Image (tube, helix red, strand yellow):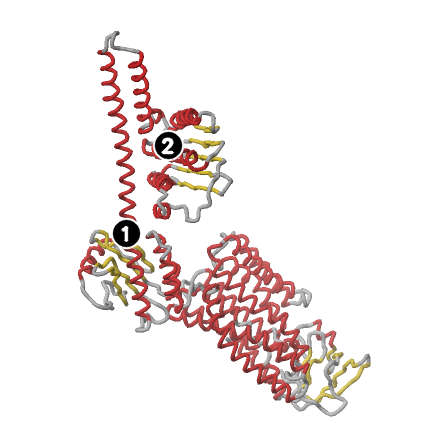
Amino acid sequence: MAILLFYSYVDFFQHPFGFGWGPDGEVYAVFTPQPAPSLSVGDRLIAIGPLTWDAFSADLTKSFFAGVKPGQTVPITIQRNNQILTVQWTLPGMNSGEVVDQLFSEWFLAFVFWLFGTLALLLLRPRDERWRLLIAFYYLTAIWLIAGTRLSNDHIWYRALVLRIAIWISIPVYLWLHWVVPRPLGRLPRGLIGFASLAVLGLVIAQWFQILPQNLYYIGFLLSLLGSLILLVIHLIRQPEFHQEMRLLWVAIFYSLVPLFLIAPLLTNLTASFLNGTAQTDTLALITVPVLPSIYFYSAYRRQLGGLEMRVNRIISAYLFIVLLGGVGIPLFAFADRWFPSTDDTLIIGGLGTLLAAALSIWIFPRFQNFVEQHLLGIPLPFGQIQQAYSTGITDSISLKSLTNLLNDVMLPSLLVRQFCFLYFDRDYPKVLLAVGVDVKADELSKLSTLKDLHFNDHLKIGPYPWVKLMLPLRVGKDVLGFWLFGRRDPDDFYSQKDLPILRSLADQTAIALSNILQTERLHAAYQDGIQRSDIVRQQISLELHDSVLNRMAAIMMKLDDRSMTPEIQASYTELTGEVRKIIRELRPVMLNYGLQPAIEAYVDTLIDQMDGRVRVGLDLKSDGSRYSQEVEQHLFRIVQEACMNARRHSNPTLITLSGQLRSDLIELTVEDNGSGFNPKEILDLNALQAGNHFGLSGMFERAELVGAEIAIESEGGKGTRVRVRWKPNGE
């Protein structure tokens, strides 16, 4: 701050010379015209007093008008239209023209960066590496901004050297900061950090003694800028989970640099008639630069803003819209001023432009704000659209997981709720379905069981925990299925009367969805139990047929003598036992006792016999001889069996192929046919299949779920069907 105040004092009180010049010595403005012959815009400086321009440019410690006081006259040698002239210039001292020019320069940006650096220093935690680098980034940028204004061309108080030294120090700070923000790309070797520190120290010393070329610092500035951009691209590629923060940083860079390098030159050529030279146009472009420090601050520590986050979100949206409106409106106004040079026309155009800007602000800004909040700031939906979006999304929530995802991804972020707990009662015992920002311990849940017996008409504002600000019941009729517990919320932890009807409506919709999901899960569990029981009954019946019926039939045949054993009886006996053995194989394939591979191979042989040459059946099964649990082998075999039966019954194929691999760590099975296929309109998951009465397919999905396997069905009309099953131990 001392450095900023010192050079600000120099700019306003020690600098005023009555004219300004650029880095090439060309006069760009004359603020205090003097009697002819005098200075004019476009003159090129040759010498001021005894100091020539070449000597001045070669030594950054020398300055013009050294020791000259206001009111004293100094000879100035200039080049004008290829002529060398000498004019007598009286130093005017502080004057309004030069003060205005300085006010419209970039000096104020230094204080913006200082402000954010000080806020980071005082408010942000933890005080880690990122915290120190962010503060250094802000303060170093503030120093080279205050030292690098247009007035740095005068070399007063070593400001040209300060500018260059600050930029050399900024190189490692900028690169290191963008290495660790938003999350470190890796661990930097201590040797590299030490080498960079020594290199920068050497550059600073060489710059102080002016050993380096005077304009070499431009390369250093470009190195820090391009290096930072490259690191941001690497973050974008390697850290996709931080795309939200990276989008913010890229928007900040776009808003900061594009107006500065594209819009400012355009305005300089267009606005000469209603703005005073380049100073004001540069300032219009510089208004966008504060986006950069503010977004860095916001993206790095937005969650620490607490109750201020929503207000900051709205400020960012409004600021970006103003910049966008100005970036479009000012060039249009400049073009109009060129086309209509009359003052009256300019006033009319200005009035119409103001009305148009107001209309656009009313009509476009809400949409722009919604866009910024959803795509840049991570707020999925504006408050007014939550109910409609939630109603649409909840119809697709057919599981507890999808319901909690809808709450966590849509409702809570849109409402800016930071603490939330979703309790539901499972046989009168409370369970946590979703907890955000809170830790509900298991031993505390037993205390909540009494909540179900409470009677109330509206809502409870006093919950079972100190952090609870609002509690809403999830009711279907007179039954309470659970509760929503709301805690901290941006910006002020307040749930207004305007919010309560919407929240109650969302809770009622959730209660109905929860009731349906729980009922579906109970039916699902009963269905799974039915499959297990069916398999057990199948096995029992097959054993009974094998051990009882076949044995008794054999005993009967043994009691018949030769006269009673006619060829007809023998044929009937053989046919009957064959049918019984076929039923036994269908109920419980005997080859499953020897493993999944023999069972599938035996089934393929049976399938070939049943097809009687009408359909070719191929088998390509690789196995390492591994065995699996009886349950896994049985369910995977039934899935293969059902897939083949579906192909036979519905697809009319000419070829059915079974392929896959059986390893100790992986089972992959594929059943593919070249039949008619189908175009599934519903999603091929368990709930949708059961709802559509596709019990064969739903049984396949059910069996896969019972053993933790993955199943996928691909089909297209006229191009056959492919069923893939994949299983790994322990659901890996």
Q: Residues within 10 Å of mark 1 (few under 14, many from 20)?
A: some
Residue name at image x 76 percent, y 91 percent: 36
| Residue that badge 2 annotates | 637
The amino acid type, in three-letter code, at marker 1 is Leu
Q: CA distance from mark 2 to mark 1?
A: 30 Å
* Residue named by callout 1: 518
Q: Say which quarter of the image contains residue 27.
A: bottom right
Tell me if residue 550 comes above or below residue 360 in the rendering.
above
Give the camera-side residue of 32 and 428.
428
Residue 19, quarter of the rendered image = bottom right
Front residue of 366 and 530: 530
Judge by depth and name the residue closer to the eye, 298 or 61. 298
Badge 2 marks a residue whose secondary structure is: helix
Q: Is label 1 in a helix, a strand or a loop? A: helix
The x, y position of residue 21, in whole percent, is 69, 79
Question: Compared to 305, does 439 lie above or below?
Answer: above
